[in-house]
Image (cartoon, rainbow, N blue to C red):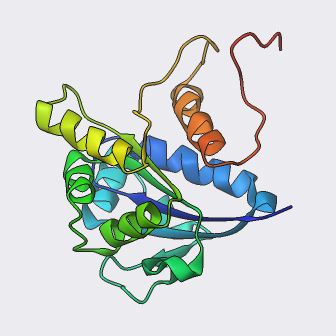
Amino acid sequence: MNKHKIIVSVSGASGAIYAKVLFDKLQQLSEQIETVGVLMSDNAKYVWETELGNKEYENLPFDFYNKQDFMAPFASGSAQYETMIICPCSMGTLGRISTGISNDLTTRAADVILKERRKLILVTRETPLSLIHINNMKLIMEAGGIICPASPSFYSNPTNFEALVSTVIDRVLTLSGLNLDMYRWGDTK
């Protein structure tokens, strides 16, 4: 089995629970993963602490990188990370990526992923959307990126916030090429 090399960037958008559930599930799928490189903006840490009331991100078993560390392996396509997930993705981050502004490691890594024709998945968190947001999403999609809004589904009858968030994160992980047991439409489980 080919193990996955994944970059996860957490921007300062509201929705830290999406990042938390993503990290929990990546740990559960560790047998399919070679490495996970993590980027968290200062705003992402602040939002996590505000929304979740803790600093559990400090205890994650992944490799963390500074936002200006352009020596990180995934700052180059030669490191062959095949997937980058930005979760949650702010509209500012999306805008910088869509216009090719690589002013930090998140935007540089996204640029690398797109130029190498690999998977860039943006879990966007904003409502309502302006025409600028929609046009930036269009540019990213035309460049090969995937926009996966943090819009949970309800047909699995989630019973708590984490189960509701999992309806989005399970889709993201499936888009990433990971195999997981998840509710699928029409399942009789």
Pick whichever, 24 or 147, lies toward us.
147
Picture residue at 30% right of the left edge, 49% below the top? 50
Query: Residue 37: where, in percent of width, then height?
Result: 53, 71
Classify 115 as above or below 22. below
Picture residue at 26% right of the left edge, 50% below the top? 94
Picture residue at 61% right of the left edge, 49% below the top? 176
On the image, which quarter does residue 6 sit in? Answer: bottom right
Q: How many marks?
A: 0
Picture residue at 60% right of the left edge, 10% below the top? 155
Farthest residue to the bottom: give it. Answer: 71
On the image, which quarter does residue 106 sit in? Answer: bottom left
Q: Quadrant of the C terminus?
A: top right
Farthest residue to the right: give it. Answer: 1
Pick whichever, 7 or 44, lies toward us.
7
Classify 88 as above or below 4. above
Query: Residue 104: where, in percent of width, then height?
Result: 27, 74
116 lies left or right of 142: right
64 lies left or right of 187: left
Query: Residue 157: where, in percent of width, then height?
Result: 62, 12
Q: Quadrant of the N terminus?
A: bottom right
Residue 55 visible in the shown view:
no
Residue 175 visible in the shown view:
yes
Classify 59 as above or below 181. below
Query: Residue 64: where, in percent of width, then height?
Result: 48, 75
